[in-house]
Image (tube, rainbow, N blue to C red):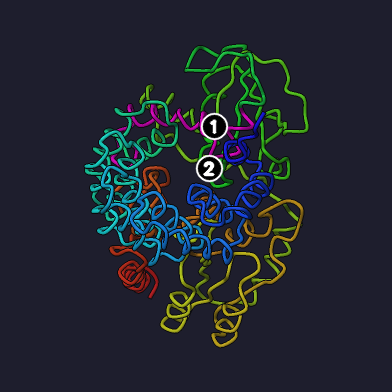
């Protein structure tokens, strides 16, 4: 029986057996080097194998054979897209779309390129063009909403997230995007309901691990917990733990209940009062319990009880040795003490260090860097300003934030990016100023200069994308008013 080599190659290609597919494609091309059907698949395969130089030769040869093939042009655009050569990717996507306007993914990918590069108006135009070609492309609606969100048009963002969900109600990440937009707009009832979709997302390891726990207990939705056991699963970042652990104290206040707190890593357990909570982590066996839920799901439950903004609970234990260490280190610095933190785990929330250098040049105060391992460039700038003080060995203990907590306690003010330091400082009751990017996290809501979560926090908002000038002008003004 005659072997159909081409079908065999396509089968291997589709199953991810790329090297075997390549072997067969090359076998066919030895006898027929201009076999267009093979070349059309061989180029994308080489691109998948990251053999870009050889792939480019194959694409160029294919274009000479058939310069008007929209699929070939699309694949060639994808070849450049994968290498982040965006100008050429856009050119070939456009060429493909002009020949075959029904191929809405050409414009969709152009939109994605513009979205990544923060050219939001161009992204909006491309996504709308994609949607016009295919009104069922729910991902284009989602990314159109993302584009509107990035320019601060939150009503349009909400509208297009909703449209995306109408088309495909089963994509968790679109639901989560919609949820955070609703929450930002303080639509708490619908927002927290939508936010439950995060537990089905494959984007976050937290929720993949949650599925693996295969818990049989009932999900707690606010039922009476008297004489019950509740398992609470922590999620997302350390800032979320610090901010929202308050609800565990609220539950303890309301019921005679045993709370089992499941931490991703036990190194954070020194924060918490073990006499109030049973602390476990992923290496421990989960004890018997009656109910379970995630930490951030408690917000939706307490919102239904009209108790969303429960008071801050300063749960940090006192560490006498560390307190004495920092009292001694800081006592020689006289005058105003201001803690500063510029960097977060998300680049979009970072503060260029030059803003703090400028503050230090204007005001006669001591600025203490409360963060680990500043960059070499920052250290150079610090060396010029004698009133910016850096401690290179901060928080080197196995117990995170021990030093940061004691330093913050001795500050008159903390000015920080939206990171865990902000929540540490706010929870400790310190006067805290948080610098927010143009598109801030939902928990700070819109246009507010005060926080619903912390009475001692003031918010300074950027009015332009990637520009904190207006926020820091307000900081300079308020510093003068408050302390000078």
Q: In this view, does 222 lie to the left or right of 218?
A: left
* Identity of the residue drawn at 46% across and 75% down: 356
Quarter-of-image position of residue 178: top left
Q: In this view, does 50 lie to the left or right of 156?
A: right
Which labelled disc corresponds to residue 46? none
Q: What element carries label 2?
A: helix
Q: In which quarter of the image is the C terminus?
A: bottom left
Vertical relation: 147 (above or below) 356: above
Q: Which of 338 and 163 is in front in this view?
A: 163
Identify the element where label 1 is drawn.
loop
Asked if one can make out residue 78 in the rendered structure from this viewpoint, the answer is: yes
* Residue carrying label 2: 240
Query: Is residue 145 placed above or below 438 in the rendered structure?
Result: above
212 left or right, relative to 80? right
Q: Earlier in the sequence, mark 1 or mark 2?
A: 2
Residue 116, magenta (yes or no): no
- Judged by its main secondary structure, the magenta piece is helix
* Badge count: 2
Q: Where is residue 137 in the image (x, y as percent from the top left)?
A: 32, 37
Q: Where does residue 56 sit, x and y in percent of width and height?
A: 52, 64
Residue 339 image offset from top left, x and y in percent? 53, 66
Q: How far apart are marks 1 and 2 (CA)?
A: 9 Å
Q: Mark 1 points at which residue?
A: 295
Q: What stretch is highlighted in magenta?
A: 183-210
Check whether the beta carbons of the residues at disc 1 and disc 2 lie within 8 A of each other: yes
Q: How crowded is mark 2: few (under 14 residues within 10 Å), some or many (20 or more)?
A: some
Q: Position of residue 134 (x, y in %)?
A: 27, 38
281, above or below 426, in the image: above
Residue at left offset 54%, top offset 32%: 295
């Amino acid at each position: 029986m005659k072997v159909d080599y081409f079908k065999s190659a396509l089968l291997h290609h589709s199953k991810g057996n790329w090297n075997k597919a390549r072997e067969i494609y090359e076998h066919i091309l030895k006898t027929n080097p201009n076999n267009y059907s093979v070349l059309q698949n061989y180029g994308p395969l080489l691109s998948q194998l990251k053999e870009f130089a050889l792939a480019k030769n194959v694409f160029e040869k294919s274009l000479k054979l058939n310069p008007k093939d929209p699929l070939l042009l699309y694949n060639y655009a994808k070849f450049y897209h994968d290498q982040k050569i965006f100008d050429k990717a856009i050119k070939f996507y456009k060429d493909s779309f002009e020949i075959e306007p029904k191929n809405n993914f050409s414009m969709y990918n152009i939109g994605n390129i513009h979205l990544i590069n923060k050219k939001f108006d161009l992204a909006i135009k491309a996504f709308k063009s994609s949607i016009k070609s295919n009104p069922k492309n729910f991902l284009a609606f989602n990314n159109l909403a993302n584009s509107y969100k990035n320019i601060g048009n939150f009503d349009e963002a909400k509208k297009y997230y909703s449209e995306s969900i109408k088309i495909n109600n089963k994509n968790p990440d679109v639901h989560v995007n919609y949820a955070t937009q609703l929450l930002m707009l303080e639509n708490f009832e619908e927002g927290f309901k939508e936010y439950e979709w995060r537990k089905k997302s494959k984007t976050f390891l937290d929720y993949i691990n949650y599925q693996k726990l295969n818990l049989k207990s009932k999900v707690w939705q606010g039922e009476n917990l008297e004489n019950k056991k509740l398992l609470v699963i922590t999620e997302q970042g350390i800032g979320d733990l610090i901010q929202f652990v308050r609800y565990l104290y609220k539950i303890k206040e309301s019921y005679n209940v045993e709370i089992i707190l499941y931490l991703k890593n036990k190194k954070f357990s020194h924060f918490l009062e073990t006499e109030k909570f049973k602390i476990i982590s992923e290496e421990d066996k989960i004890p018997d319990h009656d109910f379970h839920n995630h930490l951030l799901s408690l917000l939706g439950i307490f919102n239904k009880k009209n108790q969303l903004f429960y008071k801050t609970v300063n749960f940090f234990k006192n560490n006498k040795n560390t307190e004495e260490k920092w009292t001694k280190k800081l006592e020689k610095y006289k005058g105003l003490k201001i803690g500063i933190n510029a960097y977060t785990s998300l680049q979009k929330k970072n503060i260029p260090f030059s803003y703090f250098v400028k503050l230090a040049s204007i005001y006669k105060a001591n600025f203490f860097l409360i963060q680990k391992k500043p960059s070499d460039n920052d250290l150079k700038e610090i060396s010029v300003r004698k009133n910016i003080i850096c401690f290179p060995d901060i928080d080197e203990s196995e117990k995170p934030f021990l030093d940061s907590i004691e330093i913050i306690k001795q500050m008159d003010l903390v000015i920080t990016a939206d990171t865990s330091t902000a929540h540490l400082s706010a929870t400790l009751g310190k006067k805290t100023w948080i610098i927010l990017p143009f598109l801030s996290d939902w928990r700070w809501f819109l246009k507010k200069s005060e926080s619903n979560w912390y009475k001692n926090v003031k918010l300074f908002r950027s009015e332009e994308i990637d520009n904190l000038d207006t926020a820091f002008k307000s900081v300079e003004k308020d510093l003068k008013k408050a302390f000078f």
